[in-house]
Image (cartoon, rainbow, N blue to C red):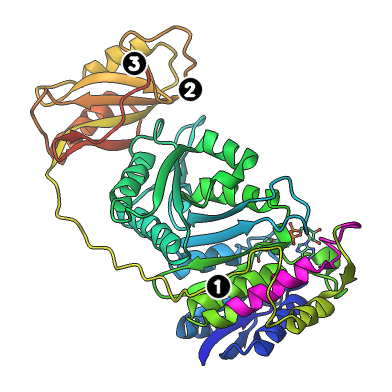
Amino acid sequence: MTNITVAKGDGIGPEIMDACLAILKAAGAKLKIDEIDVGEKVYLSGNTSGIAKSSWDTIRRNKVFLKAPITTPQGGGYKSLNVTTRKSLGLFANVRPCRSYFPFIDTKHPVMDMVIVRENEEDLYAGIEHQQTHEVVQCLKLVSRPGTEKIIRYAFEYAKQYGRKKVSCFSKDNIMKQTDGLFHSVFKEIGAEYPNLEQEHWIIDIGAARIADTPEIFDVVVTGNLYGDILSDITAQIAGSVGLCGSVNLGAECAMFEAIHGSAPDIAGQGIANPSGLLQGAILMLNHIGQSKVATDIQNAWLCVIENGIHTGDIYKEGNSKQKVNTAEFSQAVIDHLGQMPTVLKPVEYSVGQIYIPPYQRKEEAPKELVGVDLFVDWKGESPDELGEMLSKLNNEAMSLSMITNRGVKVWPDGFDETFCTDHWRCRYKTAEGSTITNKHIVDLMARSEEQGVDVIKTENLYYFDGKQAFSMGQGQ
Ligand code: NAD
């Protein structure tokens, strides 16, 4: 018996959750359910987080959370409870299997069967944004080695345990050589521990184009937070079945299972919603808690129902479908098919327990040398040469101005007149080759800037780690 937390959510949530729970019960899942309220009712009662403290306690105690979709009230300062839950519980991986069910459900991609493993906690979603000048705002893209190791290892372990053949890493490391560069290099590093799995790297733009065009060449795809967010919706959509996809948000301690669709207020209360997305989430949950036999039975029964053309309105199509059913009838059909095997669609046999990711071991620290600083300056002038001349006056024996860029493009020395410039300038001061400085030199430089009336809006230290330059060059440098 496993204790799980269940939230029936909003809109169609209660209808599809009841349908799913009926199937889990009939299939013999050994669950003890603690139900909590989340979502609209809780928001509107004045709790802007959408969840009560006692409900958090239940989720954290049970560690396994099956959640129906919730409505995020529009307007006002309501935060999405999904994002809050992911971040608060350290749910680092978002895993979304997407496959097509051709010829029973329409799709342009009959043999598609892939899983997107999306990093869920960092990258541009760290939510650290600042306005720095009148013309420029910034969002920090943070990629950590622990975060990257966790998600990459999870993708490989998932592939191994689910009998998948290939793991593809998607990044843009030709442009973001530090952040995406780390993601790609950790992929190669950890991939070496899985010699039996095929592995490849795609630059995200052409990789995404290939997913949209030829998804059958992909198996497991691991990628960063923003790329994964976009790719996982594309993948679900082109499978022809957004309403049929479930997902898990997984952390070291807790996991949350759900459908990928929302609360569908337009059809709520009519009893016609498709419970399949949430059921797919529940099947992932059963595997996670070691009840793989029940997960297998339900998935095969569900495949039979799809194959026999017993379809809810959202996927019903004259010619493909045989019988249009409502939510409760669909659920009953799955129950009636328990013990049967699909004949056209490939049956499944799960033997997956929890996927264990060892805790991150901090690496021995490589030598770190401070070799300069980027001063970011708010300046309304137009000639980079004028700024170069002004800032060269701050040079001393420790550091001198080596380059100015505007939005990353080198404009001094020897810039092009054609380069468009804003009021946000990065001014790079470097030590002579081979020498290092301390933070004290940077503080001195800032004091001299202040005396000269230079408006410094931020600084970024320039390091060598393990003898290697660990900062990007200017575009055109
Ligand atoms: P939605 O996914 O709820 O609905 C989009 C369309 O798909 C609608 O026409 C709906 O009727 C249909 N649909 C969705 N699920 C269906 C199902 N199971 N069976 C049949 N048809 C289905 O997206 P939306 O309308 O943009 O969002 C509605 C609300 O859901 C919003 O408040 C949004 O914030 C929330 N939402 C929640 C989650 C979540 O809890 N994980 C995810 C997405 C959106």
Identify the amino acid type marked 3: Leu
Classify 107 as above or below 440. Answer: below
Q: CA distance from mark 2 to mark 3?
A: 13 Å
Cα distance in 3D space between marks 1 and 3 = 67 Å
Name the quarter where the C terminus is drawn.
Answer: top left
Q: Residue at x 61, y 71 (%)?
A: 281
Q: Quadrant of residue 253?
A: bottom left
For discs 1 and 3, the disc positioned in front in the rendered view: 1
What kind of residue is marked 2?
Thr
Query: Would you name the residue on which mark 2 appears?
Result: 422
Tell which circle, 1 or 2, labels the residue nearer the N-terminal end.
Answer: 1
Q: Are marks 1 and 2 in contact (CB under 8 Å)?
A: no
Graded by Cα atoms within 10 Å as few (under 14), some (14 to 19) or many (20 or more), the crowding at tag 3 reads some
- Residue annotated with mark 1: 349
Helix, strand or loop at label 3? It is helix
Residue 393 vertical position relative to residue 322 in the rendered view, above or below: above
Q: Mark 1 and mark 3 in contact? Answer it, CB < 8 Å.
A: no
> What's the CA distance linking mark 1 and mark 2?
59 Å
Looking at the rendered structure, the number of numbered marks drawn on it comes to: 3
The residue type indicated by label 1 comes to Glu
Q: Which label sits in the foreground, 2 or 3?
A: 2
Q: Which labelled disc corresponds to residue 387?
A: 3
Q: Please tell me in which quarter of the rendered image ligand 1 is found.
A: bottom right
Left or right, 370 with respect to 125, comes to left
Earlier in the chain: of badge 1 and badge 3, it is 1
Q: Residue at x 58, y 38 (%)?
A: 210
- Where does residue 4 sit, x and y in percent of width and height? 54, 85
> Which residues make up the magenta segment?
296-319
